[in-house]
Image: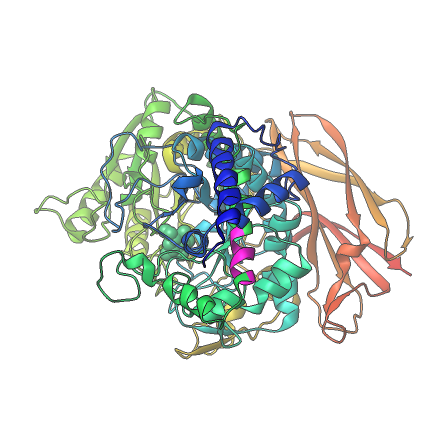
Amino acid sequence: MRVPFKKNITLLTLMICLHISLISGQDKLPQIQLEKNQVSTAYVETKIDSIIAVLTLEEKIGLTHAQSKFSTKGVSRLGIPEVWMSDGPHGVREEILWDDWGEADWTNDAITAFPALTCLAASFNPELSGEYGFSLGEEARYRKKDVLLGPGVNIYRTPFNGRNFEYLGEDPFLASTMVVPYVKGVQKNGVAACVKHYVLNNQEHLRDKINVEVSDRALYEIYLPAFKAAVQKGKVWSLMGAYNKFRGQYTTHHKVLNKILKKDWGFDGVVISDWGSAHNTKEAALYGLDMEMGTGTDGLGVSKKDNYNYYHLANPFLKAIKKGELSEDLLDDKVRRVLRLMYRTNLNPNRVLGKLNNKEHHKVARKVGTEGIVLLKNEDAFFPIKDKKGVTIAVIGENATRNMTRGGGSSQLKPKFEVSPLEGLKARYKNATIIHTMGFESGASAYNATLPPTLNQDSLFVKAIEVAKKADIVLFIGGLNKSYHQDTEGGDRKVFELPYGQEKLLNGIHDVNKEIGFLLVSGNAVEMPWTSKTKGILQTWYLGSMAGHSIADIVSGDVNPSGKLPFSFPKKLNDNAAHSFGEISYPGNGINQFYKEGILVGYRWFDTKKIEPQYAFGYGLSYSKFELNNIRINQKKYTTNDKIKLTLDVSNIGNSDGSEVVQVYIGKHKSKVKRALKELKGFKKINLIKGDKKTVTISIDTASLAYYNTDISNWSVEKGTYYLYVGNASNNITKKIKFNLF
Ligand code: BGC
């Protein structure tokens, strides 16, 4: 565009002022209130207007796509910075090469690995989620990241999804409640959280092309709420699109972005593509994508120098605007969002400096681990195990020593240290004798200790039986790992049972020693026909840097377990809703898949269809015992715009201090639409010293009982009779109370 001389002078002056103000901060940038600045101040918006006015078309285009694997270009002549991103969601990923997935081999990028998000969800502790987010945000800030690519809130639909460990479980209310403080915590550091993967990316198998067909009700009631909460309550500054299609169109440029996310929910942040999920310039420009990342290391598949110019939102977009095929306003809106992100992050002069690997972060990681571990079985009070002289504990299983922060795909981490379960137990048990043997091995893997050539699965088995014979107690540490087709990105699991011959090994050990505790290291449910061969079972997730210490805290009883399952464990694979409808429902026919279970995901399915799960959603034992008494609600009748006030007494009647999670589910009696028997609508984690009692109140908006009414494409609260269920697991209800909405 040619600019007249006079206008040129004005522009030049403006540009110089801008440059000075952006880099020196002399022009008093607005005091951004980091927690509240979802709606940017008028000042910032005016400032953004003035920047857009002086940016050339090419410079604007440069802000909307990658310049390297994890960064976008700034505009150096104006002091507009680059945007730097990193995975996410359990720690800040190591530096990788500019244009290659290879590791950069820096020596200063080792971080704290926090427990996987399934574990965080299992803590049922939103406050702790805030501490998690804040600590992680501090690390991201220290590592000079502007955007942290997490958290993930895709709903747990099938135990085969390789990436479930990165998400917050099967229930939209739980995921929504946990995601908000995480996002706020990260963003307090002036680092944007990036909630992902929007939307319906509920499996890894064929994720880059599978077309999901799902009802509007399931979309709105199950799959969208956690994203909505992140946007409206968490005020998240960025969001990542997904790889899959929905109703025939790629989700990264789709009307779920413009219509639902931006218009209905008022999202004013940046939509970032998943790496390589943008497919088309016109759709990317028109349907809500703001920043294109990872389209290919060589642009669009052609190996050219400066290949990022071949991205869909690069030269092709520029050309289309120049030709008048696409409006420049589309670009301006994207640029406005990117600049707004900058004012919230790298142009905010009040950003803290961040912290890395400090004691507080390790403490948070350990606490999330201990609060998330779930005690599934405890026959004859097998756990906790006392540290007594003369007692021999055999620790058996590859997962006792295997590194679990490596592998898994983009969430892989390079922690400064990772305390293995064996190390953690050895550090805690000073009187008892701990003996260890590998027991089974998972095959060649870069992340596995090298197996001496004389050892194989058979010799490991024989040795394990020998060791088990000599021990008083066996701790079997097994489960899944982060290898391909286990808990990892890019492919789903193939089998539901325990891999690598673990069941055979367990049976063998059981023949010689009955005192077995099983520690299940996984981010997914596994088939468990073997529970009777154990006395105790702990679900121990992937716990990051402090894994071994968190495990030892629970095994020893230093901390009383209080985690609850954030997803159901089916007895058989086909008991799971998605699987029960066959291949067309999961994994699809290679082109399409139909979410035939609709809204009946997870425990909604088990409850409604009266199928007994192996372990139910919300279930988890304690070393203590709790009672819920005096459970009442403040009225019998409510309007559709009211608050239900539930009050109850929670008592710790056992012998140790601990925490219980009170869970409130509500179901409609005789609904005119299909409904789950009950749905989680409230919960509270209560800490109680032994012998103590607390009166607890939980408030529930009657508006939250709405269903998505497809007749009016909006939410409706149905009048009539409802039941409120109070308990400490979805299948352990202490009291059912009837009430009416009128
Ligand atoms: C993943 C994202 C991740 C991105 C960058 C993609 O393959 O799906 O979750 O943030 O890579 O590593």
Q: Position of residue 598 (x, y in %)?
A: 60, 71
Looking at the picture, does residue 136 appear above or below residue 709? Answer: above
The residue stretch that appears in magenta: 329-335
Residue nearer the viewer, 487 or 464: 487
User: How does the figure colour the protein chain or chains?
Assistant: rainbow
Secondary structure mostly seen in the magenta stretch: helix
Q: Position of residue 543 (x, y in %)?
A: 41, 39
Q: Is residue 197 magenta?
A: no
The residue located at (69%, 57%) in the rendering is: 679
Residue nearer the viewer, 512 or 619: 619
Q: Is residue 695 left or right of residue 280?
A: right
* Labels in figure, total: 0
The residue located at (20%, 47%) in the rendering is: 446
Looking at the picture, does residue 623 appear above or below residue 223? Answer: above
Q: Is residue 612 left or right of residue 39?
A: left
Find the residue positioned furthest to the front.
5
Residue 4 visible here: yes
The residue located at (71%, 32%) in the rendering is: 651
Q: Is residue 33 left or right of residue 416?
A: right
Find the residue positioned furthest to the left.
453
Looking at the picture, does residue 48 appear above or below residue 325? Answer: above
Residue 730 visible here: no
Q: Position of residue 229 (x, y in %)?
A: 64, 50
Ligand number 1: quarter of image = bottom left
Quadrant where the image shows the C terminus: bottom right
Quadrant where the image shows the N terminus: bottom left
Q: Position of residue 238 (x, y in %)?
A: 53, 49
Residue nearer the viewer, 374 or 407: 407
